[in-house]
Image (cartoon, helix red, strand yellow):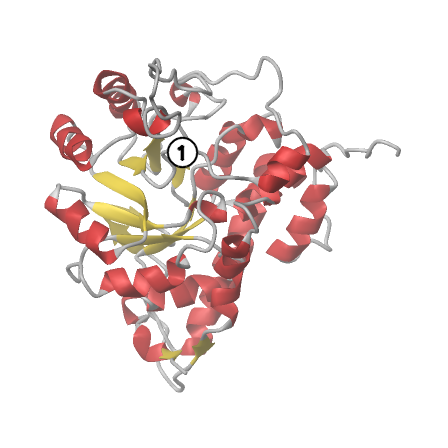
């Protein structure tokens, strides 16, 4: 079998790249098969990966006509910050395996397109290398196995003008990823992760200890750790990966100021509830003005509209941003954001909604 030829990133955008689906096809040309399978793959049978996408296709829109939309805008305000539009870049680690400029390229694209970027703990780019005076950036924290190590990263993010701490809580243990294992996925030798080792040291197991429950799970965060962290920083703490309404209520009780409804792109637990369904359940039990953000399966501007109509304050894109990054670096990520923003604007206009506050469940048909 001949080795796949991996093309260099594009330096200009060809006219045939018009949609996120186009970028998905293009990105594969620029990545090795191992990295592509890592990017596209999910947990076990990948039902959740497919469900994230399928949920949007099952929702029908009910537009309103003959409205004055001349005051229209996509601006939104979340946790006191104003954003030009509600399409944000999700935290994704190890981005230099997709493009040499990695997170720096995504940060540049986000700044130019007025988007908000969440920098992963597993970034290849030091957070101090990103533009300090750009306020539209949050830091995603993977718990470091101890309070001291976790807080050190939070304090560094504070010093670098990050505006929120996003604690990922849905992956205390790696999911069973069949596709990754079949291609023997591994990170490039010598890849730098300036803020954390790729594998947090495990507790020393004694005879009779369980390798899972006394291993990674023994150093996973608890609600008490979240309450402690909230008290240690003036930045808002957001939990990423909440799917159960009872956990949403617990988050508020423990001082959390926002939630990202997400199933980690279907990469951790397979056949879990689709985040678009979880969003609707959680919306019913939190205060009306509580920030709920959505992550999972956004591929069109109409998907953004549907997520907002069902209760989201903003949405995150993960794989689509990486399709742009792999295809053409910062230029590709910027174009992906531009495509989604324009599709969202046109969807808003055709639906008869001038502002994000106008987008409600009234525009969704429930079978």
For the residue pair 306 and 146, the one nearer the viewer reads as: 146
Question: Which quadrant does the N terminus fall into?
Answer: top right
State the quadrant of the C terminus: bottom left
User: Would residue 245 be visible to someone looking at this image?
Assistant: yes
Q: Residue furthest bottom?
A: 66
The answer to which quarter of the image holds residue 362 is bottom left
> Whole-percent x and y of residue 239?
27, 42
**Residue at x 30% of width, y 35% of height:** 167
Q: Residue at x 41, y 55 (%)?
A: 272
Task: Tell me which residue sits at (52%, 16%) in the image.
Answer: 192
The image position of residue 235, as x and y in percent, is 20, 33
Relative to residue 228, is residue 357 drawn left or right? Answer: right
- Residue 83: image location, x then y, percent: 33, 49
Camera-side residue: 37 or 107? 37
The image quadrant of residue 120 is top left
Q: Residues within 10 Å of mark 1 (few under 14, many from 20)?
A: some
Q: Is residue 88 left or right of residue 220?
A: right
To which residue does mark 1 refer? 173
Circle 1: element type: loop
Residue 184 in percent (x, y) is at 66, 29
**In the image, farthest residue toward the right:** 2
């Amino acid at each position: 079998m001949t080795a796949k030829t991996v093309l260099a990133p594009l330096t200009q955008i060809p006219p045939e790249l018009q949609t996120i689906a186009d970028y998905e096809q293009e990105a594969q040309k620029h990545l090795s098969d191992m990295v592509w399978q890592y990017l596209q793959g999910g947990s076990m049978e990948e039902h959740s990966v497919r469900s994230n996408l399928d949920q949007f296709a099952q929702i029908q829109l009910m537009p309103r006509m003959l409205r004055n939309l001349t005051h229209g805008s996509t601006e939104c305000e979340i946790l006191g910050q104003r954003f030009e539009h509600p399409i944000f870049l999700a935290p994704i680690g190890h981005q230099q395996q997709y493009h040499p400029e990695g997170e720096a390229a995504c940060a540049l694209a986000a700044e130019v397109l007025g988007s908000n970027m969440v920098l992963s703990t597993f970034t290849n780019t030091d957070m101090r290398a990103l533009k300090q005076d750009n306020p539209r950036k949050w830091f995603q924290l993977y718990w470091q196995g101890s309070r001291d190590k976790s807080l050190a990263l939070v304090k560094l993010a504070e010093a670098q003008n990050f505006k929120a701490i996003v604690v990922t809580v849905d992956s205390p243990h790696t999911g069973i990823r069949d596709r990754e294992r079949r291609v023997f996925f591994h990170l490039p030798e010598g890849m730098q992760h300036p803020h954390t080792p790729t594998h947090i040291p495990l507790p020393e197991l004694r005879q009779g200890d369980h390798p899972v429950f006394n291993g990674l799970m023994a150093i996973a965060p608890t609600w008490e750790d979240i309450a402690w962290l909230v008290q240690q920083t003036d930045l808002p703490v957001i939990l990423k990966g909440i799917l159960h309404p009872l956990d949403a209520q617990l988050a508020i009780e423990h001082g959390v100021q926002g939630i990202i409804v997400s199933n980690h792109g279907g990469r951790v637990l397979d056949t879990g509830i689709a985040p678009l369904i979880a969003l609707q359940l959680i919306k019913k039990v939190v205060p009306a003005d509580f920030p709920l953000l959505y992550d999972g399966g956004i591929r069109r501007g109409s998907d953004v509209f549907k997520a907002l109509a069902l209760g989201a304050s903003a949405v995150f894109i993960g794989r689509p941003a990486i399709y742009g990054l792999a295809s053409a670096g910062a230029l590709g990520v910027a174009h992906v954001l531009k495509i989604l923003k324009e599709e969202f604007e046109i969807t808003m206009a055709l639906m008869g909604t001038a502002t994000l506050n106008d987008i409600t469940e009234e525009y969704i048909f429930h079978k």
